Amino acid sequence: MTHGLQIYNNQGETVLDTETGESLLYTGSSNIASAGSDYPETNWAGNQLILARPRYSTYVNKTISRYSWGGHWALAQTGAAPQLVWRELRTQSQDGLNPTGYGLLIYKSSGTSSSDIILSATDLDSTAVLVATGKFNGTDGSSGNEGFYYEFTMDSNLDKGRYYVLATNTQSQYAPGIRGSTAYQIHINYRFNYSAGTIRVQNYFVTNQDTASASSTIESRNYDWAIFYVRNGGSEDDNF
Amino acid sequence: MQGLEVYAANGEILIDINSRMTRSVTSGTTASIANGTSVTVNVSGMQTDNYWQVFVAPLTPPQNINARFQDCTRNSGSFTITNNMGAASAFDYVVIRSG
């Protein structure tokens, strides 16, 4: 690098780099969605990543996913949280920011328009720190009712209400098993257990779930999952 | 200590020297591809390690409850989306980076 600015964290991971010009991702405002509604129904730009979590700590073992039925995305699905909190994970350079006042402002080398912003500290109302990532190919669990997963443990010193999962590429389906057919579910999603302080990243196909004859197989995917910790998200995140 | 710290106006810390922050690399929409086929998108510098993530969602999610949706594999310099949904669809994608 002959000129510019690079900032790393204490693990040597890049926080920003004017040479690559990649803009910082930050979080938008919180929204509430209820089961049965299109998901997200309002306030979604349609091209932004979606972070979500169950709304209340009293929800037990609820999943976060996007459920597909009839060509539409929805929240409703067996095992889903009745209500969830969701936010967009937004790109600063795509938000038409017009920074004023104090704070650090960094552009990439091509100019000083809002689309050239790499970091505008004064426009950072809340941020999302990546705390875990991997692929939907976990092998923990069993061939019974619980299925297969990788289990992430929340830091007990942090607020559990600030943990969000990347919901955009989750996949869930539910077939009730009517007229003699076998009931089944596909879980490429997340299951929150606030009592245990865990988030299971699930990847399994199960028949007759929640019965004595439940039978699961691994439904492995090559694509990515991610868990974030949201900072300064407001009172909605501080109710745990 | 070295690194960047950013605080909100209320004093809460937004970025500290431990933070693994993410940046947007690219995003877009593929052409529609048929069930059982794949599409590859080139991304300069992309690696297979966990400092890169690709998130993909179909524009027309499956009507068929027997569908197995899609998969996405990161390669060096590209990623590949495979359509297993039982129906043709284009796919939205977002590539982010954390290292």
Image (cartoon, grey):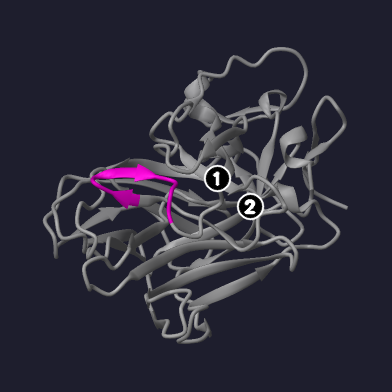
Please state which of residues A200 and A78 is positioned toward the viewer in this rendering. Answer: A78
Cβ atoms at labels 2 and 1 below 8 Å apart: yes
The stretch of residues the image draws in magenta is A68-77
Please state which of residues B63 and A29 is positioned toward the viewer in this rendering. Answer: B63
**Please, what secondary structure does the residue beneath circle 1 have?**
strand
Residue in the picture at 72% in, 52% down:
A57
Residue A124 seen in the figure: yes
3D distance between C-alphas at marks 2 and 1: 8 Å
Location of residue B82 by image quarter: bottom left
Q: Amino acid at mark 1?
A: Leu
Location of residue A235 by image quarter: top right
Decide which of tag 2 and tag 1 comes sooner along the chain: 1
Task: Report whether B69 appears left or right of A219.
Answer: left
Q: Which residue is mark 2?
A: A228
Residue B14's place in the image compared with B53, above or below, is: above
Residue A111 seen in the figure: no
Q: Which mark is residue A51?
A: 1
